Image (cartoon, grey):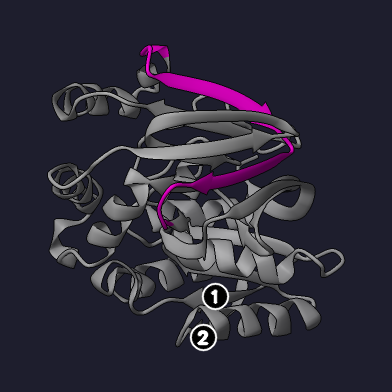
Amino acid sequence: MRAFALLVNPHAAGGRPLRLLPRVEARLRDLGLEYSVQRTQSLLHGCELAREAAGRGETPVTLSGDGLIGAVAGALRDIPDATLGVLPGGRGNDFARTIGLPLDAVAACDVLAGGRASPVDLGEADGRTFLGIASLGFDSDANRIANAAPPQLGRLVYVYGAFRALMAWTPARFTVSVDGDETSFSGWSVAAANAGFYGGGMRLAPHARLDDGALDVILIGESSRLYYARTLPKVFRGAHVRVPVVSELRGAEVRVSADRPFTVYADGDPVGNLPITMRAVPGALRVLLPA
């Protein structure tokens, strides 16, 4: 029987993990699971707690948003036999969605009891680990606005960020190299996807897999603001990849530069600046997945 170290981010989604905690603890007790609870003070503190728990032979479990999950994944990737558990407590919960975890944290507790520890790929952006999608360009502006938005907007912060960014956007010139093959284009954004979802359920990379040792690269070319706004709803179904201005590539290493500065965001947090190199790290971490 595993012992679990529950890492609770009290700041995620306006304090949602703290509101969920009493019911999560009740469910863990009902399941007969041994666990401890620690509140994280920052991403770095969460990583330290995760490494300490793994060193004690416990399974770190994040009750948080995607940012802490990605950071803890990076902290555990070099620890032999380390396994990560996930309870969704953020606004987007895109990694939980990717692995088929219930989006209700109490229901997801059952996966801690009966799930299977399976290896998953990670992404790496200039040495910083991410689980989901690293993106830049228009996405840089949208992420920055979403992260500063009122927490009461919930998942709508990502749509809010996109439409706020839309008003001021001007196209950029990107140069993208995927496994050495270079492409240059003018447009909106570049994304390197280890998993399919971002932005609270947007299926940006519908063909991405966590076990293929590659990143799916999504390029969004130039179009009018109106055309972009009309296309945006299609991303929730993954249907946007059939639009002419969208291209899909795939590779193990992706290098990106642009004609103006951009911050790269992954798992909801900034992870670097251009120019940047992103890589797939195959089977780098075991995660408790639904059986």
Residue 210 inside the magenta-drawn segment? no
Picture residue at 66% right of the left edge, 38% below the top: 210
Query: For mark 1, does the 10 Å Cα neighbourhood hold few (<14), some (14 to 19), or many (20 or more) residues?
Result: many
Mark 1, secondary structure of its residue: strand
Picture residue at 60% right of the left edge, 54% below the top: 276
Circle 1 is placed at which residue position? 6
Q: Is residue 133 left or right of residue 76?
A: left
Residue 253 inside the magenta-drawn segment? yes
Answer with the quarter of the image where residue 16 lies.
Answer: bottom left
Q: Which mark is residue 129?
A: none
Answer with the quarter of the image where residue 241 lies.
Answer: top left
Q: Is residue 151 left or right of residue 113?
A: left
Q: Is residue 147 left or right of residue 118?
A: left
Question: CB of mark 1 within 8 Å of CB of mark 2?
Answer: yes
Screen quadrant of the N terminus: bottom right
Circle 2 is placed at which residue position? 38
The residue range painted magenta reads: 242-262
Along the line of sight, the residue nearer the viewer: 180 or 163: 180
Return the x and y of residue 284 as percentages of the image width and height. Answer: 78, 53
Give the residue type at disc 1. Leu
Q: Is residue 32 visible?
A: no
